Amino acid sequence: MSATAVIGLQWGDEAKGKIVDLLTDQHDVVVRYQGGNNAGHTVVCNGQTYKLSLLPVGVLRPQVTSVIATGVVINPKALLGEIEGLKSRSMPVGSNLLISDRAHVIFPHHVAEEAALEESRKDNAIGTTMRGIGTCYRDKAGRTHAIRVGDLYYPDIFRTRLADIVAQKNTILRALAPAFTPLDAGQIAEEYLGYAKQLEPHVIDTTSFLHKSLAQGKKLLFEGAQGSLLDIDHGTFPFVTSSSSSGCGIHSGSGVPERSISRMIGVVKAYTTRVGGGPFPTELNNAIGQHIRDVGREYGTVTGRPRRCGWFDAVAAGYGARISGVDCIAVMLLDVLSQLDEIKVCTAYDIDGERTTDFPSHVEALARAKPVYETLAGWKSDICGVRKLADFPKAARDYLETLGELLGKPVEIISVGPDREQTILD
Ligand code: IMP
C-alpha cells in the first residue's frame, strides 16, 4: 500500500495545500479527485506564493505527475487560464499534468443557472462560489444534459448534443430570469473545441493510469478539496458543495480503492472557519472573531469573501474525522491564536436541553446547537519560530493534546506559518 490522502475535516480552507506540497517530495503522483475551480489552495514554494484552484498542488514540482481525476468537474477556460498563469511565472505545465477523459465539463449555462438559482433563494442562498459546480454535478447525476471531457473529441456528436442541451437550458434560464440573453450553442461549441485541442496532450484514461502506477509501486497522494463537513452526503446539507469532499470521495472520484491508502491525514485549523451560508455553532460575531479573521487573513482564495470565524468545534471536526476515516491529525495555523488570553474548544452541543457529542444530521438541529466549551489558557507568545514539539509553551502543548484527545487521533503535524520550515512533524 503506497498511497496517502490529505482530507479537510472542517468546512474547507484548512490549509491542506501546504500539507500536500510538503508531502509531494515523497510521492510520484498527486491526484485531485473531486470539486473543481471552487477550491483554492495557497502554497508558498521557493519563496513564491501560488494560488491554485483546479490544478493539483503537485504541478509546482515538475518531477511529480499531477492528475485531475474522473470525479472533478472541469471548466476548461479556467484550467487553461491557470496553466497560462504558471507558464508566465516560469512554471510550465507539460506532460506532468493528466486530465481524465471521464471528468465532466462546466459550460456557461451551468454558471448562469447557478446565478439564477442562488438569486432566487435570496436570504436562504447556499452562498456558493458561483463557478457552476453544483449545476454541473446535477447534470452529471441527471445524465441527459451532461458532457464529459472525452465527448469533446467527437466534434460532430458534441455539436449536436450541445445544441439540444443549450436550447433547453435557454428555455429554463429565461423562465428563471426573464432578462436572460440566450446562449449561442454554436459559438460555445467552437470555443470549447478550441479548449479541447489545447488540452488534448493531457487527456487520458486516468483510472487506468493510476492503477498502472500502483502496480509499478509508485506512491500516490490524494489531495482533497473543500472539507468533510461540505460533503454532499455527509455534510451540512443543503449548505454543502456538490461532491464527496470527505475521504468518502476518493474511491468514487479516482477509481482507486480506499484500501490502497495507508495513511489518511485529517487536516484542521486550530479554530474553525466557514464561507457561505449554513449553521456554524461556534461562530464568533465579535472582536475575537474579527481578530482571528485579521491575524489568519481569513478571506477566500477564490471569491475574496471574508470567512466566518469561530472556536475549534471538536464535535464537528470529530465527525469529519470519523466519516473520513483518518489516521492522524495535522493542526494548521496554530500561531493565529497566539495573542489570545484564553482559548475555547467546543466539546459537546446542547440541543434543546440535551447534551450530545453527535453531529446532528439536520441543519435545523445544528442551528439550535449551543456549544459546550472547555476553556484553556492562551500561551501569549510568538510560536512562529518553534520547530520542535518540546519547544512549544506548555499552554500550546496542552491545547494540541486536547484537540488530539477530542478527535481520538494523534496530532502528528503542526503548522505555525506559511513556510515549509514552519512545520513540526511529530
Ligand atoms: P460550491 O462548491 O461553489 O457549490 O459552494 C457550496 C458551498 O461550499 C459554499 O458554502 C461555498 O462557500 C463552499 N465551498 C466551496 N468550495 C470551497 C472551498 O474550497 N473552501 C471553503 N468553502 C468552499
Image (cartoon, rainbow, N blue to C red):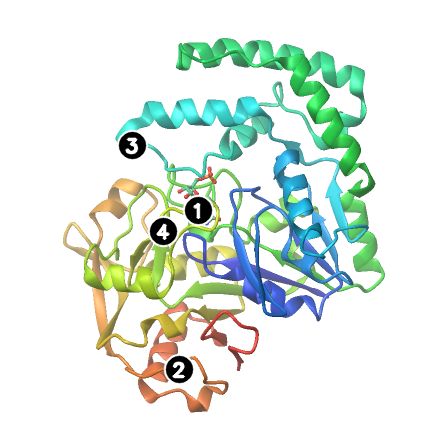
Q: Is mark 1 in CB contact (under 8 Å) with mark 2?
A: no
Res. 98 mark: none
Q: Is residue 200 above or below residue 90?
A: above
Q: Amino acid at mark 1?
A: Leu
* Residue designated by label 1: 230
Question: In front: mark 1 or mark 2?
Answer: 2
Corner quadrant of residue 320: bottom left
Q: Amino acid at mark 2?
A: Ile
CB at disc 4 and ligand 1 closer than 8 Å: yes
Q: Is residue 305 above or below residue 334?
A: above
Quote the CA–CA distance across marks 2 and 4.
25 Å
Res. 274 mark: 4
Q: Nearer the viewer, residue 288 or 190?
A: 190
* Residue designated by label 3: 124
Q: Secondary structure at mark 3?
A: helix
Quote the CA–CA distance across marks 2 and 3.
40 Å
- Mark 2 vs 4, N-terminal side: 4
